[in-house]
């Protein structure tokens, strides 16, 4: 039951953190309705990350798996961000839309990174607390 509540609280906290980053970027870049995609992706990333971390808590070496999972997710989002930036720069000069492309790229990557980091920190904190309690009670 502890793992379920850990994942539930991590879902809300990391979703809130990702949404705050997305909202801050939307305000800073004076975004319009195209930023709806960013908020949808932020919610989707929160759901997927929650499921992955929830399953990872059931393994016997959960702290190691959770660390690797967070590292892989961070690397994935950094590579996606670099790929999107590279795609933006690969467009012909007359078709580049700097004003709308780069804020969307930042909006897709930065809230996802914030979601993964906050989720990882919360789950590792709760998992570490559980290990300490188990060792004291044993």
Image (cartoon, grey):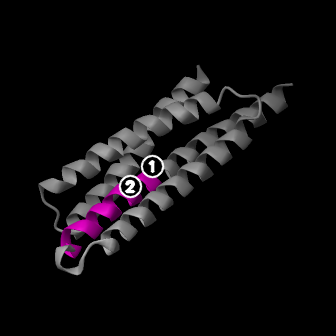
Please give the name of the residue rendered at 20% of the width and 49% of the height, measured from the top-left corner.
36
Secondary structure under tag 1 reads helix
Q: Is residue 78 above or below residue 5?
A: below
Q: Nearer the viewer, residue 22 or 99?
A: 99
User: Which range is magenta?
Assistant: 97-114
Q: Position of residue 64 (x, y in %)?
A: 73, 43
Q: Is residue 128 magenta?
A: no
Graded by Cα atoms within 10 Å as few (under 14), some (14 to 19) or many (20 or more), the crowding at tag 2 reads many
The answer, for residue 92, to whether it is visible in the render is yes
Q: Residue at x 64, y 31 (%)?
A: 57
Q: Is the residue marked by circle 1 packed among few (<14), some (14-19), or many (20+) residues within 10 Å?
A: many
Residue lying farthest left? 32
Instruction: Name the main secondary structure of what is drawn in magenta.
Output: helix
Lateral position of residue 44 relative to residue 3, left or right: left
Residue at point 52%, 27% (across, down): 5
Q: In which quadrant of the rendered image does the C terminus lie?
A: top right
Q: Is residue 113 magenta?
A: yes
Q: Which mark is residue 115?
A: 1
- Point out residue 53 in the picture as x, y percentages from the top left corner: 57, 35
Q: Is residue 128 visible?
A: no
Q: Secondary structure at mark 2?
A: helix
Residue 12: mark: none
Question: How many angstroms separate mark 1 from mark 2 (CA)?
Answer: 6 Å
Picture disc at residue 111: 2
- Give above or below for 111 relative to 95: above
Contact, CB < 8 Å: mark 1 with mark 2? yes
Percent position (x, y) of residue 31? 17, 63
């Amino acid at each position: 039951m502890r793992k379920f509540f850990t994942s539930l609280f991590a879902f809300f906290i990391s979703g809130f953190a990702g949404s705050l980053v997305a909202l801050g970027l939307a305000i800073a870049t004076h975004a319009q309705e195209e930023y709806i995609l960013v908020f949808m992706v932020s919610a989707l990333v929160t759901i997927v990350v929650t499921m992955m971390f929830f399953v990872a808590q059931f393994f016997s070496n959960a702290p190691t798996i959770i660390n690797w999972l967070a590292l892989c997710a961070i690397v994935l989002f950094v590579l996606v961000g670099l790929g999107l930036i590279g795609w933006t720069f690969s467009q012909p000069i007359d078709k580049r839309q700097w004003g709308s492309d780069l804020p969307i790229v930042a909006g897709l990557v930065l809230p996802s990174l914030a979601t993964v980091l906050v989720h990882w920190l919360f789950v590792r904190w709760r998992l570490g607390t559980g290990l300490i309690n188990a060792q004291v009670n044993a």
